[in-house]
Amino acid sequence: MADRPQPHQLQVHPQHLYNAGIKTLLPQKGPSTSQVLAVIALLPLAGFLLLLAGLTFAGSALGLAVITPLFLIFSPVLVPATIAIGLAVVSFVTSGAFGVTGLSSLSFAVNSFRQAAAPLPGYLRSAMDKLGEKTKGLGQGIQKQAHEGGPIRKLGY
């Protein structure tokens, strides 16, 4: 056998099984007075709400049983009417969406024109003037080369 280290000390913790039955599952102390009063007060309310839920369910089932044959009899009228009402609602919603889109587009265009008509700040005006001068000079250089008929050379900025 292989040499395995032997434990120097062995501790045994015995498990005591207490066979008291249901007493181990219940708390040792009973419910307080306020808990008992809360249960007594809320038990009739819970029963009443359960009764209302049952009556509502029974009424819904009875109503469905009565209405189902009427739906089948009147379905040739109800289905086209439902489709027509649905299309009318969709058209109203769509027209509203188009109206809001048109108004927002018009507002955007008016604001853009107002900003375009507003005077530019000094640094932007000078930059636009310089750009205009360079563009004008470049256009004149291209015209001059086109009239001379010489080789096209790169124009400097």
Image (spheres, grey):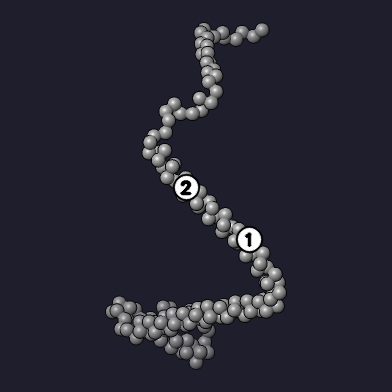
Circle 1 packing at 10 Å, graded few (<14), some (14-19), many (20+), is few
Residue 50 sits above or below residue 60 on the image: above
Q: Nearer the viewer, residue 28 or 92?
A: 28
* Helix, strand or loop at mark 1: helix
Is residue 8 visible to us here? yes
Q: What residue is drawn where x is 56% and y is 8%? A: 6
Circle 2 packing at 10 Å, graded few (<14), some (14-19), many (20+), is few
Q: What residue is drawn where x is 63% and y is 79%? A: 81
Q: What residue is drawn where x is 69% and y is 76%? A: 74
| Quadrant into which the N terminus falls | top right
Quadrant of residue 76 in the image? Answer: bottom right
Residue 44, disc: 2
Residue 147, disc: none
Q: Amino acid at mark 1?
A: Ala
Q: Earlier in the sequence, mark 1 or mark 2?
A: 2
* Helix, strand or loop at mark 2: helix
Counting labels gives 2
Residue 37 sits above or below residue 76 on the image: above
Quadrant of residue 103 in the image? Answer: bottom left
Q: What residue is drawn where x is 44% and y is 46%? A: 42
Cα distance in 3D space between marks 1 and 2: 26 Å
Q: Nearer the viewer, residue 10 or 105?
A: 10
Image check: 72 left or right of 36? right
Image check: 42 left or right of 123? right
Q: Amino acid at mark 2?
A: Pro
User: In the rendered image, which residue does mark 1 sit on?
Assistant: 61
| Quadrant into which the C terminus falls | bottom left
Q: Nearer the viewer, residue 96 or 9?
A: 96
x and y, in percent, of residue 145 in the image = 49, 88
x and y, in percent, of residue 24 in the image = 50, 25
Quadrant of residue 141 in the image? Answer: bottom left
Is residue 155 visible to us here? no
